[in-house]
Amino acid sequence: MTMRTETTGEQLSTADFAAAPERRTAAEEAIPSAERQTPVEPKPADRADRPQPSPLFAGNEAEGFRGRWSDVQAGFVDEPRRAVEQADGLVAEVMQRLAQVFADERRTLEQQWDRGAETDTEELRQALQRYRSFFDRLLAL
């Protein structure tokens, strides 16, 4: 299942993200697949004093994704298979965009470090909070 992205014109699918087993660590491989797919409930202490998650995308970008999702969902009645293919492509595109957002943030911090510039501890704290927020959301799914 693939979908051509509007921005790059390349075909994406969730299989593209899963097709890289060589990227899995030895620890990941040691976990049986049934256990990898079992959701883990965070302990109450893990949730304590956590700030509310910040948006992962700018408002207009998130709204664009939501609008496209609505179109996919609406198309299910007439063409279910095509709707599922489009849903897969849209999810892959969102995953790719999200990875790009984090990569851009990391690149900005690394450029500051490479110039020998001191990165403000507050900037680093906010970056770590964004990573933690995203990580918690992934595990809560």
Image (cartoon, rainbow, N blue to C red):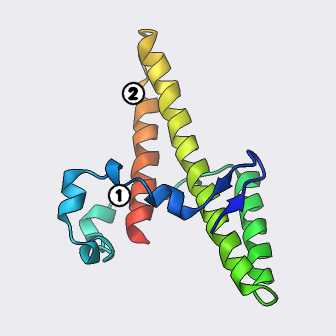
Residue placed most toward the observer, 15 or 31: 15
Q: Can residue 97 be spotted in the picture?
A: yes
Quadrant of the drawing holding the N terminus: bottom right
Label count reads 2
| Residue 78 rendering spot, x and y as whole percentages | 82, 88
Kindly identify the residue that appears in the image at 34 percent across and 48 percent down: 23
Kindly identify the residue that appears in the image at 38 percent across and 57 percent down: 50
Kindly identify the residue that appears in the image at 40 percent across and 56 percent down: 135
**Is the Cβ of the residue at disc 1 closer than 8 Å to that at disc 2?**
no
Q: Which mark is nearer the camera, 1 or 2? A: 2
Q: Can residue 117 be spotted in the picture?
A: no
Q: Residue furthest top?
A: 116
Q: In the visual, does 105 lie left or right of 42? A: right
Residue 90, by quadrant, is: bottom right
Of pointers 1 and 2, the one earlier in the residue sequence: 1
The residue labelled by disc 2 is 121
Amino acid type at mark 2: Thr
Residue 138, by quadrant, is: bottom left
Taking 41 as reference, is 19 above or below it? above
Distance from disc 1 to disc 2, alpha carbons, whole Å, reads 19 Å
| Residue 71 rendering spot, x and y as whole percentages | 80, 74
Q: Residues within 10 Å of mark 2 (few under 14, many from 20)?
A: few
Kindly identify the residue that appears in the image at 65 percent across and 64 percent down: 2
| Residue 44 rendering spot, x and y as whole percentages | 27, 70
The residue labelled by disc 1 is 49
SS under mark 2: helix
Q: In the visual, does 127 lie left or right of 75? A: left
| Residue 24 rendering spot, x and y as whole percentages | 30, 52
Residue 4, by quadrant, is: bottom right
Amino acid type at mark 1: Asp
